[in-house]
Amino acid sequence: MDFLKILRSFEEFLFEATAWLLFYPMTVWRIMRHPLAAMSYSDRQQHEPDERRYDEAMSPPLVLLVTLVLANLIAAAAHVPPPESTTHLAHTLLNSQQNLVLFRSLLFSLVPLISAASLVRLQKKQLSRQSLMEPFYAQCYLAAPCACFVGLGGLIVQRPDISNAYGVAIIIAGTVWFLWVQSAWFAQKLDVTRARGAVLASWAMARAVVYMLAILIPFALF
C-alpha cells in the first residue's frame, strides 16, 4: 500500500515537472505579450477551486521562482564568479546555490509585496493576508520578466569580455517595461490617470528598493 502511494506521488511529480516545460514558456510569453491580461487572469484564478486554479498556466510565485532558478543556472553555466564575500553572512549566502536562490527570491518578492500592499491601502481595504494575496499573485507575474531582464543584464555586466553598457541597457529596459505596466495596473485598479499611476508605481518601486537595501546592508557589514 505504501509502495502504491509512493508510486502515485512519483507519477504526479513527474507529470508536474514535465508540464512545467510546456507551461513555463507559455506563461512567460503570455505575460510579455499581454501583461495586464495575464494579471487579470491571475485575479480570476484566486476565486477558482483549488483543483482548477491556474489550470492553463503556472502559478505566479512559481513562475517567479523558476525564473530566478534559471537565471542562477545560466550564471553558473557561464562561469560567472559570485561577488567576493567579505563578511561571514555574505560567505554563508554566496557559497550555497540554494541559499542564493532563496535570498534572491526574497528580494524580488519585495516588489510584488510592496505594490500589493500599496494597492490594498489605496483601496481603503484592511491589510491582511487575504486582501494581499490577489494583488501579490498578479504582481508576481509582472515581476518574473523584470527579474529575467535584471538577471540577464547583471550577468552581462559581470562578464569581462562584454561591454557593461549592454548589461546596463538591458536592466534599464526591463525596469522601464515593469514601471510602464505597473503604471497602467495602478491606473486600472484605482480608476486614476496614467500619470497618477506612474507616480504610485515609482513610489512603490522606490520603497521596495529601500527595503532591499535594508536587507543587503547587514550582509555587507557583518
Image: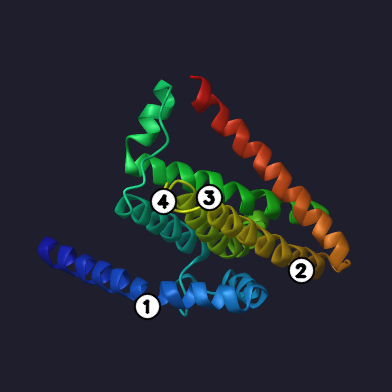
The answer to which of marks 2 and 4 sits earlier in the sequence is 4
Q: Residues within 10 Å of mark 2 (few under 14, many from 20)?
A: many
Res 130 quadrant in image: bottom right
The answer to which of marks 1 and 3 sits earlier in the sequence is 1
Q: What amino acid is found at the position of numbered circle 2 in the picture?
A: Ala
Question: In x, y percent, where is residue 101?
Answer: 40, 46
Q: Nearer the viewer, residue 141 or 124?
A: 141
The answer to which of marks 3 and 2 sits earlier in the sequence is 3
**In the image, is residue 65 above or below residue 12?**
above
Residue at 38% over, 35% down: 94
The answer to which of marks 1 and 4 sits earlier in the sequence is 1
Q: Is residue 127 visible?
A: no
Judged from the image, the secondary structure of the residue bearing numbered disc 2 is: helix
Q: Of tags 2 and 4, which is closer to the observer?
A: 4
Question: In x, y percent, where is residue 156?
Answer: 47, 53
Q: What amino acid is found at the position of numbered circle 3 in the picture?
A: Asn
Q: Is residue 80 left or right of residue 64?
A: left
Q: Which residue is mark 4?
A: 161
- Determine contact: label 1, label 4, CB under 8 Å: no
**In the image, is residue 109 above or below residue 28?**
above
Q: Is residue 211 left or right of residue 11?
A: right
Judged from the image, the secondary structure of the residue bearing numbered disc 3 is: helix
Judged from the image, the secondary structure of the residue bearing numbered disc 1 is: helix
Q: Which residue is mark 1?
A: 22
Q: Which residue is mark 2?
A: 184
Which disc number belongs to residue 164?
3
Image quadrant in which the N terminus is located: bottom left
Q: CA distance from mark 3 to mark 2?
A: 31 Å
Q: CA distance from mark 4 to mark 3?
A: 9 Å
